[in-house]
Image (tube, rainbow, N blue to C red):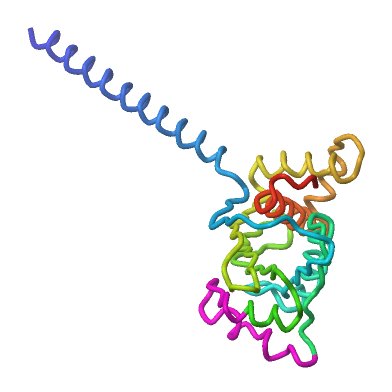
Amino acid sequence: MKLPLLSVVIFCCLIFLISCVTRRGIDFGHWAGSAENVPLIHVYNLTRNPPLVPSNIIAVLPPLGVLPEEDRDGFHQAFLREAQHYFRAQVIAVKKEGVFVNYLEEKNLAPHPAILDFAEIARLGKLLGAKYMLCSYVREVKQYPPQNYAIYFAMIATDNGNSVCEMDAHFNAMEQRVEVALGEYLQSRRARPYDRTNLEIMLRSPMEYRAFVLAMSCKAMAEAVWPNKKL
């Protein structure tokens, strides 16, 4: 009688373990599915705004955050270029020189890490005659393969110092969804069929990858702020 009882106990234990493994597998599947659906760019604090007109000025601030000093100018120029492509207005760069040097110190624009002083940025925008200010704060960066950018973006209205739009963008080249987005970017911006060689080149090139991240970010912001605007 002991042997059958032992067999029953073992059988019950096996059933319990299998059910646990199955449940863990289901939970992991749900988690994985949710992770895949998390957007590369999260837009929030969005407000309604009148359409852009060609005379509007949008000023692009130099990047803030952990970006190495030697890469800041290249990032700034790429951000300016992509903003000019997606925002149908006069997009200008705010250069850290002359009378604006002190204004553009990070301790003045972001007195606390990743927390921008919207009122101060709006005051600077008024001095420039800009209607909106485009800001970026690099939270994480790895510029060589596998590349990774985590960036906070904000568009600020200079007339009242309020946020027009805020975004968190996270592009980790190790994620498959980033590779898919990069393939779509290749086709849309370069007007040529998807090619694995071109994709690999962009995944290895710090400049190409940075341009991709900033293009996707500017596009997302433009579409969010002015959804009826044809880009």
Q: Nearer the viewer, residue 81 or 193?
A: 81
Residue nearer the viewer, 64 or 219: 219
For the point 65% across and 73% down, the residue is 158
Residue 206 visible in the snapshot: no
Looking at the image, residue 193 sits to the left or right of residue 185; the answer is right
Residue sitting nearer the eye, 82 or 35: 82
Q: Quadrant of the N terminus?
A: top left
Location of residue 136 in the rendering, given as x and y in whole percent from the top left corner: 66, 68
Tell me residue 184's x, y (percent).
78, 39
Pick whichever, 104 or 55, lies toward us: 55
The mark total stands at 0
- Residue lying farthest to the right in this orientation: 192
* Position above or below: 23 against 151: above
Q: Quadrant of residue 28?
A: top left
Residue 9 pos. (x, y %)? 17, 17
Part of the protein shown in magenta: 98-120
User: Is 105 in the magenta?
Assistant: yes
Q: Is residue 174 left or right of residue 30?
A: right
Which residue is drawn at the image coordinates 79% and 57% (left, top)? Answer: 87
**Residue 116 appears left or right of 197:** left
Q: Residue at x 27, y 19 (%)?
A: 14
Q: Is residue 141 above or below residue 169?
A: below
- Residue 169 visible in the shown view: yes
Going 62% across and 82% down the picture, which residue do you hit? Answer: 106
Whether residue 118 is in magenta: the answer is yes
Where residue 122 appears, as percent x and y from the top left, is 63, 77
Q: Is residue 98 above or below residue 137?
A: below
Using the rendered view, name the quadrant where residue 154 is placed. bottom right
Residue furthest left in the image: 1
**Residue 178 placement: quadrant:** top right
